[in-house]
Image (cartoon, coloured by chain):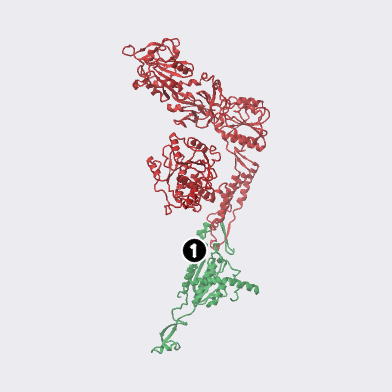
Amino acid sequence: MSQPLLRGRMKPQGPVGLRRDAEKVAGALPPLLAEAEVLAATVAMGVHGRRRAGHGENFWQYRQAVPGDARSMVDWRRSGRSDQQFIREMEWEAAQTVSFWVDDALSMDYRGSDDALARSKAERGRLLALALSVLLISGGERVALMGTAAQQPRGGRTQLNKMALALAGAEREDRPDYGAPPPDRLPRGGRAIFFSDFLGDLDAYLPALGHAADQGVRGCFVQVLDETEETFPFDGRVVFESMGGETEFETQRARALREAYVRRLAEQRARIDDLARGLGWRVLRHLTSQPPRTALLWLYMAVGERI
Amino acid sequence: MIGSLAFAAPWLLAGLLALPVLWWLLRAVPPAPGRRAFPGVRLLLGLEDPEKMPERTPWWLLALRMLALAAAILAFAGPVLNPRPRAGEGPLVVLFDGGWGDAPDWAGRMARAGAALDEAARAGRPAAVLSMAQPVPPGETPPFRAAGDWTERLAGFAPRGWGPDRNAWAEWFRAAEGDFETLWITDGVSDGAEAALGAALIRHGAVTMVAPPDAALALTPPRLEAGALTVTALRAGAGAARPVGVAAIGPDPNGVERTLGTGSGAFAEGADTAEIALDLPAELRNRVARIALTERRSAAGVALADDSVRRRKVGLMSGAAPGEAQDLADPLHYLRQALSPFAEVIEAPLAETLNAAPDVLILADVGALNPAEEQELGDWVKRGGLLIRFAGPRLAQSGVGQAEEDPLLPVRLRAGGRSVGGAMSWGAPRRLRPFPEASPFAGLPVPDEVRISSQVMAQPDPDLPNRVLATLEDGTPLVTGHALGDGRVVLFHVTANADWSNLPLSGLFVRMLERLTQSAGGLATSAEAVAGSVWTPSQVLNGFGDLEPPSLVAGVPGERLIAERPSRAMPPGIYASADRRVAVNVMRAGDRLAPLTGLPAGIRIETIAQPPEIRLGPWLLAAALLLLTLDVLATLRVSGRLGRLRARGGAAAAAALLAAALTLPGQGARAEGGIPAYPGRPDRIERAQGYGAPGYGDGYGGGYRDPGFGPRPAPGPGASADDKARYAATETVLAYVRSGDGRVDEISAAGLRGISEALYERTAIEPAEPVGVDLEADEIAMYPLLYWPITEGQPSLSDAAYSRLNDYLRFGGMILFDTRDADLGASMGATTPNGRVLRRIATRLDIPPLEPMPEDHVLTRTFYLLRDFPGRWANNPVWVESSPEAEQVEGMPFRNLNDGVTPVVIGGNDWAAAWAIRPDGSAMFPVGRGVAGERQREMALRFGINLVMYVMTGNYKSDQVHVPALLDRLGQ
């Protein structure tokens, strides 16, 4: 296991801090990664070619050389068996870069049920991100986790471990109530998948999304919500507050607000849809109460689509 | 005190004043809102609450809390509903009237006296309990002793059949010394001395008079009015209109006392008497022994009927030789027809008739009697007999009473007679003149068609007018009579058949005879008749109006019997002297009851039927707790936390509800689950195996058996006797005696069904559906076992039923008597109502001597080995025929019973209820508790199986002692 990753303010170093962090990481990593791998195993595996000629290691096809082809490209062994000159084309195996952003704001820590099996939105987002990463890396793609030490797109197991560490590692201390994508550079032509609840101000997303549009990055919004956030099953006199306590709202009879809330939620979703349509992105709505597999499958198909 | 509500600590009620303050405080503090972290809060911002609620506690929650607090304050103030007045100081005298008037509310009076004594005992006050129906105590102070002593003795007091002697007691109290408080529990019937008594009592201290809730009722002796038995109901005090009912009670033809008829009347508003006529057929009327009020029973509410309404014995004699005449010409024929409905007719020679002690003797056309007969007859009349003679040719020709007055004829007769309306006479047949007032026939309507054509004529002696009871329209005497000794001689101047007149053909004849017969013996109660002899009570009335054998009552001279009121020395009842009987009733004809009047002011008056003291505190406290629990729930609801509670399995809510439930007294214990189902087939390990021999039930029918039982359905109650008999004869059928009480019958049927099913499952006996038998109608010989649950309403049996039962017992049947009261005890009945009923039934049954079941009785080992025989109750002895002494046979105790199966098994364990199953096979009643209870039920079933086995196999198991000897012999 590599040096534990530290984010935010530097944590106390030295033997004590090191050991504590190591234990924390060693304790947190295997379950998350293992769970992600189990989940990924349920989706078809295997390196997938691009099914077209390009830069790659595997033979794709021979084709007759046409004027303009460089002579060095002629495959003389094949051409020697006929009068024509053939060019050996390899399958395009350029690795795709997929950038993940998993919202780590306080709002994602919410879970509506006290049930031990219930997962917070952040947990579900991390799981999905890591599972998809497992799939993509085994497919030879490169992945990156924005805003963390794993933000450089890489492939291979090492990157996976790095991502797992970053996802399961210690949380930042100054997390805001609602998150926004970090201003990381996105590789041109890559893919991006944003896991968030999208309950904050959508304007905070615009810089990152503008950059993505500039880079020609396509991707998905995955709105992870808790069931209670969709059904609003509250009643009576309640003071609602945001997870960090910044925002408060008091009502005398919560039940009476349900319809208005549901309407507001639908409006918010409509805005997300608008945003996505403008960018050419796609939107997945996922509830923590739903099984993660369908979402993973949907994401895998969405990422694998031809651009 | 507010009305009948009082508070133990009224100053605590001041706490209620604090409620408005609490109101204000509670209103100011609304319930705290729940805080919830919720990421979606941003979406909520700016939303308006559609339902504006003030930032205050909802009014209903507030009201709930105020109510809870108010209930708690009230509870601690100790409210008492119907509080007893606080006790005074000094000695307490509890004074009963103690007479018949106390009987209707006796339990209430005892309770009131008991409560007063308890209170006095707590306060350490001495007390005395006195009954004014008893003589005044010696000395000048009431016999005070510790109140606790009197509580024990209170049960010994009982109302007496006579009234209280308030006069004597007033005298005594006036002379008594010392101050005491008096609780006078009165019957509310005036005897004129209550004012004096009240004045005498109040001189010694406070007097509380406890009045009965309803006016006392009484009945005057019955009398015959226009053929109907009439009684006058009296009440003390004229109140609102009130219905009143009476029942006439007497022996039925089998000698069993029954209600022969009922009558009802009503006190009009403001009236204190009501006439009630019992319109009974003459036969029934003659059987009436007493008439009793159907409610508020007491000695005064029972009117004993003596000879005056009794059925009379009438002897008939004719001068004509019997058998010669044709029926319609027979002089006795009309008499027989007329008398038989209401009198007992004796036809025998004169000597025998007189031996039968008739009330009336009728001589139809008898001329001369021989001197001996004349002497006997004369003596009989002088002792009070009524001699009725009819004229006729023989009497006319005999010349009796013509020359001189014959003692056995009321008047002198003229020689020859007269005949009118015949072929040789001028006049027309004569009609009757209406009866004179003094005549016994007064008031009878005279039919027009009655014509007299011949008669014998009376000599116009100077005293003839006094002796005439009926005359013809021309004034000729038709019926004459005069007293002779205690009795009377009456002469009809015509024949008893239709020869001389058509009087015997008319209804008037019957009614005249009835009047005459009834008047016979009525003389016996007149003062002259009673005087001179000593009368001893044969039955006396207790205060409750029940007849009892007398104890320690001396004979009463006849003069006093008539002149005096019933008293301690002369309790009401039936008095006999020789063969005459006189009823002494509490009430006399013409008596009235009056309420107490003229009581001095200052006497506190309350009624007996005061509702009991109820302490409301615990209930209010429970209500307060309940309200507070509701408040918890409501608060949770208002703050929206109730839903979450529910989602967590409602544990907290359940706990709260449980707490609420426990605060309700007496509700918690019920929830222990219902009756466990019948525990299926028990293991067979414990089956008795006799003395090691193979068990009786094991060898047979080992194959598969249908779980149902009985191939044929039992015939219903409406089935014909033949069907029932065929069913009982072709199947093994257990039977129970129908008690007439639907519930008991249902339990019996279910119980026998249960035991039949157990027999079917476990033994080779496969009984069919049990049947109920009506002892009066059904043949019982075919049933091996009769289960007879005794009820209080068990009707008496007819002679036929008794003889059937005795035959049944004699020829091998068995009856299982079950008093169902678990209290047979060592005294064997008589202590419980059912036990008494059993005794009554059993006295006429042919039951051998009984003993509690010995330990080695065959019943303990016919199938299972049993030690006791529980039903729903346990540990009560079971009685069986006492067996001869056990002898030692080959080392084993052996009773040589010759297969004498005990004909009866008597117990009180309510076996049927333990056996009873519902159609679905589950037990009908719980037995005991838990596993021990199920064990008891199993034991009850085993007893039933043993019993039926015993019935079926006799003493088979008892023979098992011979098995070693038999084996020995086989071995040789």
Which x, y percent locates residue B179?
68, 30
Chain A as rendered: colour: green
Q: At which x and y percent is residue B499?
A: 35, 17
**Relative height, residue B287 to residue B951 (above, below):** above
Horizontal side of B319 relative to B51 (left or right) equals left
Of all chains, the one bearing label 1 is A
Q: Which residue is mark 1?
A: A266
Percent x, y for residue B613?
Answer: 60, 39
Q: Residue furthest left?
A: B423
- State which quadrant residue B107 falls in: top right
- Rendered-image quadrant of the N terminus of chain A: bottom right
Please rate how many residues cluster around mark 1, counting C-alpha atoms within 10 Å: few if below 14, some from 14 to 19, many from 20. few
How many discs appear? Answer: 1
Q: Nearer the viewer, residue B970 or A11?
A: B970
Q: Nearer the viewer, residue B670 or A41?
A: B670
Note whether B23 is above or below B310 in the view shown: below
Above or below, B334 relative to B652: above
Residue B549 visible (yes or no): yes
Q: Residue at x 49, y 39 (%)?
A: B790
Palette colour of chain B: red
Identify the residue at the far front of this view: B972
Can residue B437 be seen in this snapshot? no
User: Residue B201 location, x and y as percent?
Assistant: 64, 28
As helix, strand or loop, the secondary structure at mark 1 comes to: helix
**Kind of residue indicated by mark 1:** Ala
Along the line of sight, the residue nearer the viewer: B699 or B159: B699
